[in-house]
């Protein structure tokens, strides 16, 4: 059953990625990005609360460890969604997707220290292969968009680490708090994401040209942001369900492989990013790394 949840989660994730790419063209400033992120995460909170209430037994008791895990997950998600849109706006969709897919390294490493999982030679090999894969994808991106800037590298690193930390907290929640339904994790982490964005908003100034109209007042952006919220909720909820029965070292590499395959097809079909030798080698290496990481 866990692998069925992985496929469902991946489908939601691909939908979210597609909508993010469509919205990215309307994002001019950090404030625009935060406004969209706040809107969609408030919707995620509503979806999550409805799911919790449908369980029929709302548990108001929250432990300290539960708060810490969900807080870290929420902050990491706020950073991820804020950096993701800017990353796909400035770099090829496939490169950013590869970085996000490579985030499985983070829960794998954290699993060694907190989830009693063993650090093996194959995991070390997988890490080295990921580095090689990113090298080829960087070459591919350079041919598409020109030279990679320091800002782009920072954004890509932020996408990888923040996504990985969120995934690690997701697995830690199911490991340390197995008695609760994963909808609680989705709800509490989404609340912390909203709080994190609210803290960031006062420091993000609006561009003068966007002061008269909010980016969310554009019907197309509002539609895609709503679909992004649905995709974000579904991806988080069903991946957390899978985490209850599938080990981290299998769950996240498999999820990443499926996501990368979907992203590659999407970038070629919808966004005109034709694959060349470097991109094909990069994608193949990421899939090879998934096999070693199991």
Image: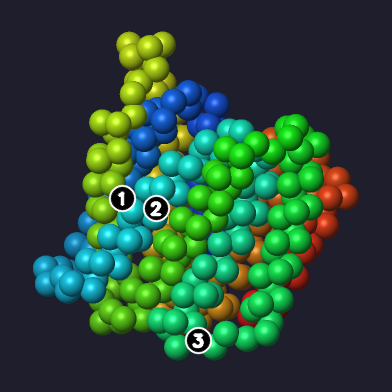
**277 sits left or right of 229 in the view:** right
Residue 47 percent across, percent down from the top left: 29, 52
Q: Nearer the viewer, residue 119 or 35?
A: 119
Instruction: Give the residue furthest to the front.
Output: 150
Instruction: Give the residue furthest to the left.
Output: 60
The answer to whether one can see residue 246 in this image is: no
At 19% from the left and 62% from the top, the residue drawn is: 53
Question: Dot 3: few (<14), some (14–19), or many (≥20) neighbours within 10 Å?
Answer: some
- Residue located beneath label 1 in the image: 193
Instruction: Give the residue furthest to the right.
Output: 277
- Image quarter of residue 35: top left
Residue 272 percent across, percent down from the top left: 75, 35
Residue 86 in the image: above or below residue 258: above
Mark 3–mark 1 Cα distance, whole angstroms, equals 28 Å
- Residue located beneath label 3 in the image: 117
Secondary structure of the residue carrying numbered label 1: helix
- Image quarter of residue 76: bottom left
Residue 30 percent across, percent down from the top left: 41, 30
Are discs 1 and 2 less than 8 Å apart at CB?
yes
Question: Dot 2: few (<14), some (14–19), or many (≥20) neighbours within 10 Å?
Answer: many
3 or 1: tag closer to the N-terminus: 3
For the C terminus, the quadrant is: bottom right
At 37% from the left and 39% from the top, the residue drawn is: 37
Mark 2–mark 3 Cα distance, whole angstroms, equals 24 Å
Q: Nearer the viewer, residue 228 or 74?
A: 74
Residue 290 in the image: above or below residue 20: below
Q: Which mark is residue 60?
A: none
Residue 84 in the image: above or below residue 50: above
- Residue located beneath label 2 in the image: 77
In front: label 3 or label 1: 3
Mark 1–mark 2 Cα distance, whole angstroms, equals 6 Å
């Amino acid at each position: 059953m866990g692998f069925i949840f992985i496929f469902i989660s991946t489908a939601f994730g691909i939908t979210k990625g597609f909508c993010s790419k469509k919205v990215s063209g309307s994002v001019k400033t950090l404030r625009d990005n935060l406004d969209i992120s706040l809107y969609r995460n408030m919707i995620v909170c509503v979806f999550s609360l409805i799911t919790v209430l449908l369980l029929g037994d709302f548990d108001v008791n929250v432990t300290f460890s539960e708060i810490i895990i969900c807080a870290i997950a929420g902050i990491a998600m706020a950073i991820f969604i804020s950096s993701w849109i800017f990353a796909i706006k400035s770099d090829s969709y496939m490169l950013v997707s590869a970085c996000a897919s490579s985030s499985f390294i983070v829960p794998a490493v954290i699993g060694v220290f907190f989830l009693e999982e063993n650090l093996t030679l194959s995991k070390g090999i997988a890490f080295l292969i990921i580095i090689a894969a990113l090298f080829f994808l960087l070459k591919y991106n350079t041919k598409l968009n020109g030279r990679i800037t320091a800002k782009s590298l920072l954004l890509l690193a932020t996408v990888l680490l923040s996504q990985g930390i969120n995934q690690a907290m997701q697995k830690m929640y199911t490991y340390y708090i197995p008695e609760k339904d994963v909808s609680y994790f989705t709800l509490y982490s989404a609340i912390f994401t909203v709080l994190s964005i609210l803290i960031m908003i006062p420091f993000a100034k609006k561009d003068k040209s966007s002061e008269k109209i909010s980016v969310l007042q554009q019907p197309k952006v509002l539609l895609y942001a709503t679909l992004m919220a649905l995709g974000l909720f579904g991806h988080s909820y069903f991946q957390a369900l899978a985490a209850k029965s599938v080990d981290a070292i299998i769950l996240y590499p498999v999820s990443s492989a499926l996501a990368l395959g979907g992203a590659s097809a999407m970038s070629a079909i919808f966004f005109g990013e034709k694959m060349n030798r470097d991109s094909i080698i990069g994608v193949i290496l990421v899939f090879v790394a998934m096999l070693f990481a199991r």
